[in-house]
Amino acid sequence: MFYMVNNYQDAEDLTQDVFIKAFENDITRIENMRAWLLKISVNTSKNYLKKKNRLNLFENLTHLISNQNIEKEISNNETRDELVSLINTLSPKLREAIILRYVHQLKVEEISKTLGIPVGTVKSRIHKEN
């Protein structure tokens, strides 16, 4: 949630909202709990960002990159900055698909269910050259 809103307090509040929404539903009928929760999370984040007029979804991707080794992090700062810059050039739809695939490591079918779009569209967004 944090990577979408770039604010810890807002992410905590939105996470609570996601679980409240989840508990209001009959979870016994859910086939893929992870994809279902991610879909609620993505939609809740989008709605929040639209209200805040901050549609730059993944402005600070560096928080997602592991900082297990400080020296490694310092040496990789330039690469990370380039990666963030490249991802920020993508449209929000492409960014969603890329982040779900490569950060959350979802399968194409799971991304399809999460975003409510056809598998072919997911594949197109993941492999689009832009």
Image (cartoon, rainbow, N blue to C red):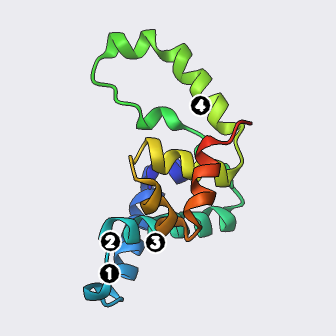
Which residue is at a point 45% across and 50% down the rendered structure image? 2
Residue named by callout 1: 30
Mark 2, Cα crowd under 10 Å, few <14 / some 14-19 / many 20+, is: few
Image position of 27 with respect to 54: above or below: below
Tag 1, which secondary structure? loop
Residues at marks 4 and 2, CA–CA distance in whole angstroms: 30 Å
Residues at marks 1 and 3, CA–CA distance in whole angstroms: 13 Å
Q: Residue 83 sits in which quadrant? A: top right
Q: Type of residue at label 3?
A: Ile
Mark toward the viewer: 1 or 4: 1
Look at the numbered discs 1 and 4 and tell me whether their residues touch, using CB distance below 8 Å: no
N-terminal of the two: label 3 or label 2?
2
N-terminal of the two: label 4 or label 2?
2
Q: Type of residue at label 1?
A: Ile
Which residue is at a point 63% across and 49% down the rendered structure image? 125
Residues at marks 4 and 3, CA–CA distance in whole angstroms: 25 Å
Q: Which mark is residue 16?
A: none
Mark 3, Cα crowd under 10 Å, few <14 / some 14-19 / many 20+, is: many
Look at the numbered discs 1 and 2 and tell me whether their residues touch, using CB distance below 8 Å: yes
Residue named by callout 2: 32
Closer to the camera in the image, 117 or 54: 117
Mark 4, Cα crowd under 10 Å, few <14 / some 14-19 / many 20+, is: some
Q: Position of residue 14 (x, y in %)?
A: 45, 66
Residue named by callout 3: 40
Q: Type of residue at label 4?
A: Val
Residues at marks 1 and 4, CA–CA distance in whole angstroms: 34 Å
